[in-house]
Structures are given as C-alpha cells and as structure tokens.
Image: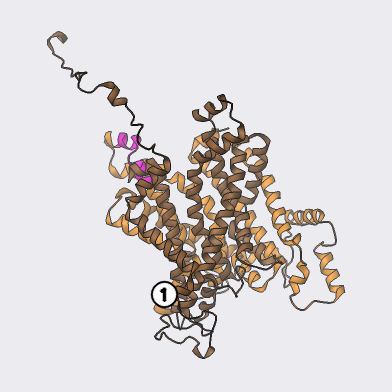
Chain colours: A brown, B orange
C-alpha cells in the first residue's frame, strides 16, 4: 500500500541562497539597541507627538509663565471678586479678585517642580537600594527588602499627610518632594531588584566575571543599564501620580503653603463657590488633568515601546 | 496552603511593628513640640502641659513611649481624640460607615471595571474599546477630589438627584454617589487591566483548544478567558486599597461623611495631630490585613504562588 503512494518532498536548491548570506550580519550599520528600537516604535505613533508637544508646552509654561500670562497672579483686588471674564482676563476672577487665567498659568510650576523632584528622588533612592539588594543578595537583601515592606505598608499620600501635618519646618516644594519620595521609593526598589535579579545570571554577566571584571564595575556597566527599562517606565507614570499627590495634599491644606500658587490649593478654595461659579474650579482642574494625562500617556507609550510582546500585540 | 498562611502571617509581624513605629516616630520624634502644636497659638498653663505630657507618656524615652502605645493598641486603646473622646468609641461609629462606602465602591468598580474591560478586550480596536479607553484615561487623570466636586455639581446641585452631604447615619442609598466618586479611578484601572489581560488570553493556546473542541463561545469566555484574566485584577485590588483609603479621606471630606476617612479629613483641617495619628494607624493596620487577605486569595487562585519557595 505504502509503496504506491508517491510522497513529494520539496527540497530547496542549495545554490539559490547561500547559507553564509542568510547568516550574514551587516557590521557596517549601527548596532540596534533597546532604546533605539523603542524610539523607532514611538516615533511612528501620533500619540507620542501629542504627548511630547503637550509636555513641552507645560514645561515652557512652568519655566516662563510670564510669557503666557500678562496679568500678575498675586495682585488681587477684592472689588473684582468672582467677576466674569473681560478682555485681557479670559477666565474671569476668583473670590479674592485674582485673575484666574494667570493663576492657572503660574500654578503649573508648583506641580511640575514637585512631580519632577519627587520622581527623581524616589527613582534614585529606590533604584540604588533595589540594585544593591538584588545584586549582592544575602543579608543585605533581606534587611533592605523588609525595610521596603515596612514603608510599603503605609500608602504614600497617607504617610505624607501625617509628616506634612506634623512637620515643624517650612513647607516648600523641596520638603514636599522629599516626603513623597520617602514613601514612594519601595515601589521603584522592588522593580529594580526584580530586574537586576533577572539580568544577574545573563551570559554576558557570566562572561564579564570570567574576564575578571570587578563586581561593582559589572553592576554599573552591565547589570544596571540592562535593568533600567522597567524603572524608566515606572518613573514616567509616577511623575503623573506625584502631581496628583501634590494637588491632593495642597487641597487638604497640608501641601504647599498658600503663598505658592498651586492648582490643588486653588481648587480647594474654589469649592465654596461651586454652586455659583463652577468655572473657578473647572479651569485649574482641567489644567491639572491635562498635565497628569500627558505624563501617564507617555508612560504607557514608553512601556509599549520597550515591551516587544506589547508591540506585537498592537 | 496552611504552610503558606503561616509563613505570610509571620511576615506580617515585623511589618506591623515597623510601620507603627514609623508612624509613631513621624509624629513624636520630629523636632518640635506636639503638645504645642495641639494648642496652636494659645499655650495652656504649665501644669496642663505637664498633665498632657504624662497622659501621652511624653515624659518617658521614645522607645518606651512607643511600646506603651503599641500595647494600648493590642488592648483596643488607640488613645484619645482632641475633643477628649476615646478613639475606639469614635471608630466604633465611624468604621461601619466607611465599610459600607468601601463595599459599595468595590462592587461598583468590580462590576463596571470587569464588564467594560471584558467587552473592550474581546473587541479590541473597535468603537466601544476606543471610547472606553479614552474615558478611562480621563478618569485616571482627574484627581478624586475634582471628580467629587464635578459629580456633586452635576447631580445634587444641577439635576437635583441625591444630596450634596450625607446625613449622620449614612444609609446605603445616600452613599451611592460618594461610592461612585471613590470607585472612579479604580474603575478605569481595572478596565485597563482586564482589557489587556483578556486581549492577551484570547490568543492563548488553552482558549484555542477550548474553541477547537467545540465549546460554546459564552462558555469559553466565562470559564477560560475571564477566569484567567481575573488573576492580575485581584493582585491590583491589594495595591489599590492604599489609594482607596486616601480616596476615602477626600471623598468623605467632600460629602461630609462621618467615617474613618472623614475623621482624618477633620483632623487635618483642625491640625489635630494625636487624632490624626490614631486614625492613620488604624488605616495602616486595615491596609496590612486587607493586603494579607488579597495575598491569600491570590494563592487560592494561582497554585504557583502557594508552592513557590
């Protein structure tokens, strides 16, 4: 039976594509890196550009508010209390008679500074601690991980409320950022530790050990750069959440002092007028939401770009 | 499983002492006089200060103070509020209200988040998916207190539905609007999580096998896709509890609800440190226990966790 059936098998003629050409690597081209690939992916999405333009605009407003608003946000006249919009004052006036548009523009600085400082501090602190714990392991890892568990048990904003309430020193952007970072670092440390643990046993690390490179040099040159991607993602996303935290604390009255113009503080003042003039609340709230959204979206995009699995799914 | 529960409980002990010590130190070891902070600009007579210091054990070394305070917690003594009421009594009336609010919020976020996430994930890239993604992004970007004011303006003030403030004993129906506010951010997060994990599981081998052996689509979705997609959602609930607590402070403050969060809100407004510490300690303990519960639930759902060393 079997012998009657002709089984056809196709065998590609070997001379068509030489094996050497299939395996050839173009060494003249620049090597592609994780970040290069990620940027190539991000570049092609219009959402990336919307985010970047929005973030650049927010940064410009935070650095040079006087270019965007002619009126002085601190020169207020109670005669203008909750006056509607007129020429030159497009958003009208708040209870104190301050120009709402100017306050929205000048409020960007507080949010951006606190968000940026808290993110940098938490990322540095958590990154260093997580990398050391993951790489050296042993008792150091146990101690640091338990310490992280303790800080992790206290929700960031809850801890910040207590410290900011009891703090005898002056409240300013720096002190608020430090307090947020103190409760925010374990999240970064956990992610960094996990990433370092998974790269620690990679072949290129073993090769470096075999070549006799010192442990600390391996950590800095090979392990950390390869474990950085998830930390960058969490940093971008947490920038948005720290801005929300600042606004929430300022809203509760334990954040920035009233002398610093902050959206959270303005929203908290505007709540008394919500029945009569809801726009007082809506303008700073919109600015706050746009800023947070820009950073959260960017975090999403970076995560997608760094994760080949997500890239394939899209 | 018993072994896992035991190990997890042992891990809780150092975290409990560490976190409570941290809170205690934050308040009583920071330079500055907490008693002076209590009275603001009107310092009381020296004898009163002495008495208050003795009452809060501030005349003893800091570690002894902490130990006495923790021993008190174990005996149900969380201290005294600024107005002189024992914290445990205030807690007894406040806790059921917050529990009702939290249960409502959890039901709302699970119901809407999972259903909408499932529909979005099944029809990824469709109109419904795009619209729900945009709305969820908006919900995540707008802080809870803004959503609270907007819904307060929209429903009780403009449409005359519901009330701007909740009455003292906070019945279930009055808590629906605050619960929606409290759940809003989590709805969006659960939606996104469910959507991503449903979309991933749609291409999984076990789903293809289930369809190939002729199971009805409804059963494949319910038993094979949804159940497996819920694992990351359950993990999320653990971390989400922290933001739910902060959200409760803001929401109960806005709607004037006399719950645990409302007490913290009032304590912050009045600058009342001892009350604040007592209630924050209570919140952190609830947070720890709830996280333990979520971990155990997670171990039930995913056997790999139980057996991992």
| Residue B51 percent across, percent down from the top left | 85, 69
User: Can see residue B223?
Assistant: no
Looking at the image, is B18 positioned above or below residue B303?
A: below
The reply, left or right, for residue A129 in relation to residue A27 is right
- The subunit carrying tag 1 is B
Q: What residue do we see at 69% from left, 70% from top?
A: B272
Residue to which mark 1 is pinned: B154
Q: Would you say residue B152 sits in the magenta stretch?
A: no
Q: Nearer the viewer, residue B179 or B194?
A: B194
Q: Which of A123 and A22 is in front in this view?
A: A22
Assign a secondary structure to mark 1.
Answer: helix
The residue under the point 34% across, 49% down is: B121
Corner quadrant of residue A13: top left
Towards the viewer: B16 or B27: B27
On the image, the x and y values in percent for residue A230 come to 48, 45
Q: Give the range drawn in magenta.
A: B197-210
A258 relative to B274 in the view: left or right: left
Asked whether residue B206 is drawn in magenta, I would say: yes
Q: Is residue A171 visible?
A: yes
What residue is rendered at 20% in x and 19% in y?
Answer: A15
């Amino acid at each position: 039976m079997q012998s009657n059936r002709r089984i056809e098998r196709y065998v590609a003629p070997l001379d068509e594509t030489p094996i050497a050409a299939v395996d050839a690597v173009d060494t003249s081209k620049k090597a592609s890196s994780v970040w290069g690939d990620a940027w190539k992916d991000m570049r092609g999405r219009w959402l990336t550009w919307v985010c970047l333009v929005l973030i650049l605009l927010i940064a410009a407003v935070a650095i040079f508010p006087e270019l965007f608003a002619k009126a002085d946000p601190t020169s207020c006249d109670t005669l203008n209390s909750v006056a509607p919009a007129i020429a030159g004052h497009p958003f009208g006036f708040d209870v104190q008679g301050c120009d709402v548009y100017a306050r929205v523009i000048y409020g960007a600085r507080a949010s951006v500074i606190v968000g940026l400082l808290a993110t940098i501090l938490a990322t540095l602190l958590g990154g260093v601690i997580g990398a050391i714990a993951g790489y050296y392991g042993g008792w150091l890892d146990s101690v640091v991980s338990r310490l992280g568990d303790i800080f992790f048990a206290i929700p960031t904003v809850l801890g910040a409320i207590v410290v900011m309430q009891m703090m005898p020193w002056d409240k300013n952007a720096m002190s608020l950022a430090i307090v947020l970072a103190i409760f925010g670092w374990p999240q970064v440390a956990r992610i960094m530790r996990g990433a370092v643990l998974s790269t620690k046993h990679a072949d290129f690390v073993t090769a470096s050990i075999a070549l006799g490179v010192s442990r600390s040099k391996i950590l800095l040159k090979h392990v950390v750069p390869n474990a950085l991607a998830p930390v960058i993602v969490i940093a971008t996303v947490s920038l948005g959440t720290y801005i929300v935290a600042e606004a929430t604390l300022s809203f509760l009255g334990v954040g920035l002092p009233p002398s610093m113009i902050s959206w959270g503080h303005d929203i908290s003042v505007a709540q008394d007028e919500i029945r009569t003039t809801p726009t007082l609340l809506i303008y700073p709230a919109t600015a706050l939401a746009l800023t947070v959204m820009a950073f959260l979206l960017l975090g999403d995009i970076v995560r997608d770009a760094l994760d080949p699995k997500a890239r394939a799914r899209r | 499983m018993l072994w896992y529960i035991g190990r997890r409980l042992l891990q809780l002990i150092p975290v409990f002492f560490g976190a409570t010590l941290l809170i205690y130190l934050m308040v009583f070891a920071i330079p500055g006089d907490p008693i002076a902070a209590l009275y603001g600009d009107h310092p009381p007579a020296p004898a009163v200060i002495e008495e208050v210091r003795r009452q809060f054990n501030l005349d003893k070394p800091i570690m002894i103070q902490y130990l006495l305070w923790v021993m008190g917690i174990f005996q149900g003594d969380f201290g005294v509020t600024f107005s002189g009421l024992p914290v445990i009594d205030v807690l007894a009336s406040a806790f059921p209200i917050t529990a009702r609010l939290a249960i409502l919020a959890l039901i709302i976020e699970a119901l809407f988040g999972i259903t909408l996430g499932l529909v979005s994930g099944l029809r990824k890239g469709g109109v419904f998916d795009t619209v729900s993604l945009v709305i969820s992004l908006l919900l995540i970007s707008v802080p809870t207190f803004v959503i609270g004011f907007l819904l307060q303006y929209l429903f009780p003030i403009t449409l005359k539905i519901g009330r701007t403030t909740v009455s003292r004993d906070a019945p279930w129906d009055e808590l629906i609007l605050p619960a929606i506010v409290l759940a809003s951010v989590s709805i969006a997060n659960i939606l996104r999580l469910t959507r991503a994990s449903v979309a991933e599981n749609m291409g999984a081998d076990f789903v293809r096998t289930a369809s190939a052996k002729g199971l009805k689509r409804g059963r494949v979705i319910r038993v094979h896709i949804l159940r497996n997609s819920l694992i990351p959602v359950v993990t999320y609930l653990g971390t989400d509890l922290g933001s739910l607590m902060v959200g409760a402070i803001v929401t109960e403050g806005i709607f004037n609800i006399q719950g645990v969060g409302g007490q913290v809100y009032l304590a912050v407004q009045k600058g009342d440190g001892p009350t604040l510490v007592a209630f924050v300690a209570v919140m952190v303990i609830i947070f720890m226990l709830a996280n333990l519960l979520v971990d155990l639930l997670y171990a039930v759902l995913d056997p790999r966790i139980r057996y991992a060393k």
